[in-house]
């Protein structure tokens, strides 16, 4: 899977957060509102074009508008990024990775419970 820039991830996050295909004006409004950007249509359009070329989005015409549909699920992309990060920075040691995560942001009790359940399922 190709890597995304931070700006491309912001655009994808907006698209992933909806349950319908989106047109440029809706994506632009959401990006600017949720991520405190001041991007113009041309800026968002550039990122959308790159995401289509990277096979993260499908673009199709509906009437006079182009709509964008995600081809990669958010969970799949996120898991890939976590795997790369763990592999690169923590030599793929889960305990070191979880320790670093907990140090950066304390794990919540329900997260710890879910991690324990995952470990129990492995036995």
Image (tube, rainbow, N blue to C red):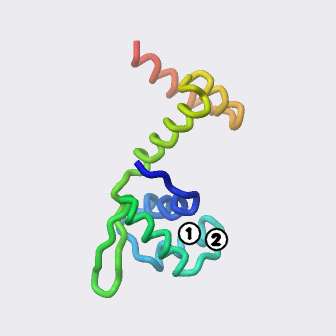
The residue lying at 61 percent from left, 33 percent from top is 89
The residue lying at 37 percent from left, 63 percent from top is 57
10 Å neighbourhood of mark 2: few (<14), some, or many (≥20)?
A: few
How many numbered circles are shown?
2
Q: Is residue 119 above or below residue 102?
A: above
- According to the picture, the residue beneath numbered tag 2 turns out to be 37
- According to the picture, the residue beneath numbered tag 1 turns out to be 31
Spot occupied by residue 91 in the image (x, y as percentages of width and height):
57, 26
Spot occupied by residue 12 in the image (x, y as percentages of width and height):
47, 60
The residue lying at 57 percent from left, 34 percent from top is 88
| Residue 20 appears left or right of 106 | left
Residue 112: mark in rendering: none
Taking depth in this image into account, of 42 and 27 the one nearest to the observer is: 42
10 Å neighbourhood of mark 1: few (<14), some, or many (≥20)?
A: many
The residue lying at 50 percent from left, 59 percent from top is 13
| Residue 78 appears left or right of 64 | right
Spot occupied by residue 45 in the image (x, y as percentages of width and height):
47, 76
């Amino acid at each position: 899977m190709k890597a995304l820039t931070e700006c491309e991830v912001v655009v994808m996050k907006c698209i992933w957060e909806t349950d319908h295909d989106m047109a440029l004006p809706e994506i632009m409004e959401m990006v600017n509102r949720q991520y405190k950007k001041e991007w113009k249509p041309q800026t968002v359009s550039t990122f959308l074009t790159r995401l289509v070329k990277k096979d993260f989005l499908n673009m199709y015409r509906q009437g006079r508008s182009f709509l964008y549909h995600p081809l990669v699920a958010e969970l799949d992309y996120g898991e890939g990024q976590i795997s790369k990060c763990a592999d690169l920075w923590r030599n793929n040691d889960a305990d070191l990775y979880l320790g670093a995560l907990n140090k950066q942001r304390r794990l919540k009790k329900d997260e710890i419970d879910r991690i324990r359940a995952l470990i129990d399922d492995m036995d």
